[in-house]
Image: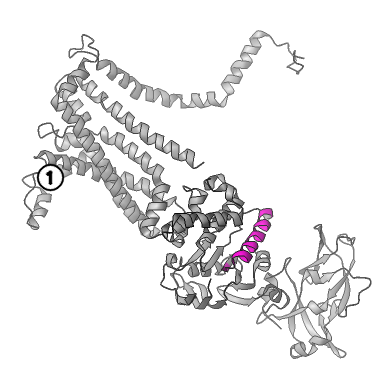
Amino acid sequence: MAQVHLRKIVKEYEGGVQAVKGIDLDIADHEFVVLVGPSGCGKSTTLRMIAGLEEISGGEIDIGGTIVNDVPPRDRDIAMVFQNYALYPHMTVYDNMAFGLTLRKFDKAEIRRRVENAARILDIGMLLDRKPKALSGGQRQRVAMGRAIVRDPKVFLFDEPLSNLDAKLRVQMRTEIKKVHQTVRTTTVYVTHDQVEAMTLADRVVVMNHGKIEQVGPPQELYHHPRTRFVAGFIGSPSMNFIPARLEEAGSGLVVRMTDRAVLPVPAARTARYAAHLGRDLLFGIRPEHLTEPHPNEHRPNIAHFEAAPEVVEPMGMETLLHFWVEGHEICARFDPAVEVAPGKLAAMAVDMDQMHLIDPKTDLVL
Amino acid sequence: MAADGTLVAGVPASASTGRANGLQRFARRRSTIAFLMTLPLIALIGGLVVYPAGYAMWLSTLNRRMTANIGLGNFELLLENDTFRAVIWQSCIFAVGAVVLKALIGFWLAHMLHHIPAKGQRKWRGMLLVPWVIPPALSTLGWWWMFDPSYSSINWLLSIFAVPAVPWLGEPWWARLSVIMVNVWYGSPFFMIMYLAALKSVPDQLYEAAAIDGATGWQGLRYVTLPMMQNIISITVLFSLIVTFANYDIVRVLTNGGPRDLTQVFASYAFQVGILSGNLPRGAAVSLFMFPVLAVFAFFILRGINRRNKEQM
């Protein structure tokens, strides 16, 4: 178990292309940190630098109080689970899991004890004599995790471990990974491009984009208080709606004006926060789940109402997604499936203005 | 309606149409089509391999004038002959020695190439393949000049380091070494290219997983590379054994079997006995001796490959 500290980490490839542009990150002992971002954002490169599989072009990586920049992977006391599992095809499941311990010259009885313990945690006891070829995707993933667990390393590294699984199995394995972490409590760095995985697994999520960290924080914080337009759009599914709007004064308060017909009042509590941006062209951001059907006995303040005709209606079972266009921008709303809506017919909608965001289009920062 | 209740074609099915249908079905079967399409190749192999092999077997049972059948007489005489026993011995030394060296050097070269960045790799790969592309009779002639006792370039190089001249083709053991060296020079690129293909097929993540598991470079080779390449190694060794055992041109050009027939291998000795000395039946018997030796090698190597394939299922 250990803390991991990244200080000004840079990865530069030949030709001067920077994949990681000087990131700082402190990971606490026992913490489960997820690096998330679109492909090419530098998350996997960062993980591979922690593992020692990529050279570090600049900065320092500290694992458990030791700077490991020049330490080979085998001496870093880490274990890694790869996207395609990377099981040794010529070895049985038992040998795959025991390999790291055998190389470290562990006692045979101790190896057996650890492998059987990991097999019990992961429920793969009956597979120990099989070769990887005879296993399903989910079973291979468990073996790959078993190989990491038996080592009892300082840090677990996961590189998109669920990407090769089908949707149903992915959800199942996600729960499994969370359960394993709650059992063994090893410091974990997990890389994924799937924000749902990030939100469900992480103690803290690190959102990366273009080789930089956009924001670090617990899942709820990223969801409710995104700091940049990128984080606001990346976290949450379906993603946040952005509509160009102008911030105007109306009576004693403020309004956001999207079109002449769509003018929404800003909650009084935010007047002071936004006052400085009066009269500016901004982006109004609202999540689909805060753009719903009106409730008859609505008691919450700051609910604004308007009507729009959805062009596309997508019944999902647990919810119905409505798509309509405002000023050439596609907007998605999330309705209760019990509400009857039809494409092309006007539907009444309610916006929870307490959940609104205003973004400065010049800096892409959330105001 | 047919007896079993299924509907058949409108015309009553007579015995003759039934046969025609059966024939059509037979002609349309995938296995029949496949057989017909491979027939030209089968005919070619039959004409160029099976017929000569059968003819050689028949020939080996005849007496020198090819007038009477003497059964296994030629084989018995050969086994009693000291020179032929030396040929068996030399053939084994030559083939096993050359194949082992080719395998080791090929493996080493493949590893070196594999670690050269892709950009420069093609150039090196091309250059290293040159020995394998030159017709061996020509390149062996070049080696023969380099081994020549009076103006040997190799001995000249050795003399620079004050090493006394070596009678490369004059002394039995040096001559044996020389033919092996030339064969190794000629055959290593084949191993290199096969091993390189095998190395490229090992996923990088296996090495990364091994590195994280704690493997040193050497342990990665021992526990990941070699097991992953085992089948290719076996097949390449088997191929090379067959070709090396049957090698003729290198010995013929370099030493012509000398000194004192001590570098003769099966093929060159068969030529010597059958063509040069005019005893075709005995020459045929010599060449047939390769067959059981190779069959034993092939059996063990193929059995190993089969077993591993089954294990990995």
Colour setting: one colour
Query: Whole-percent x and y of residue A280?
Result: 74, 86
Amino acid type, label 1: Phe
Left or right of A361? Residue A188 is left
Helix, strand or loop at mark 1: helix
Magenta stretch: residue B127 in it? no
Estimate the x, y position of residue A350 in percent, counting from the top left.
87, 72
Drawn side of residue A55 relative to residue B189, left or right: right
Q: Which residue is rendered at x = 31% and y = 52% of the image?
A: B109
Residue A247 percent location from the top left of the image: 78, 84
Task: Place residue B121 in its image quadrant.
Answer: bottom left
Q: Please tell me in which quadrant of the rendered image residue B210 appears.
A: bottom left
The residue shown at (52%, 46%) is A131
**Which region shows up in magenta?**
A168-189
Residue placed under numbered mark 1 in the picture: B147
Q: In front here: A214 or A80? A: A80
Badge 1: residue crowd in 10 Å (few <14, some 14–19, many ≥20): many
Residue name at image x 6 percent, y 51 percent:
B164
Vertical comparison of A223 with B264: above or below: below
Report if residue A188 lies within the magenta region: yes
The quarter of the rendered structure image containing the C terminus of chain A is bottom right
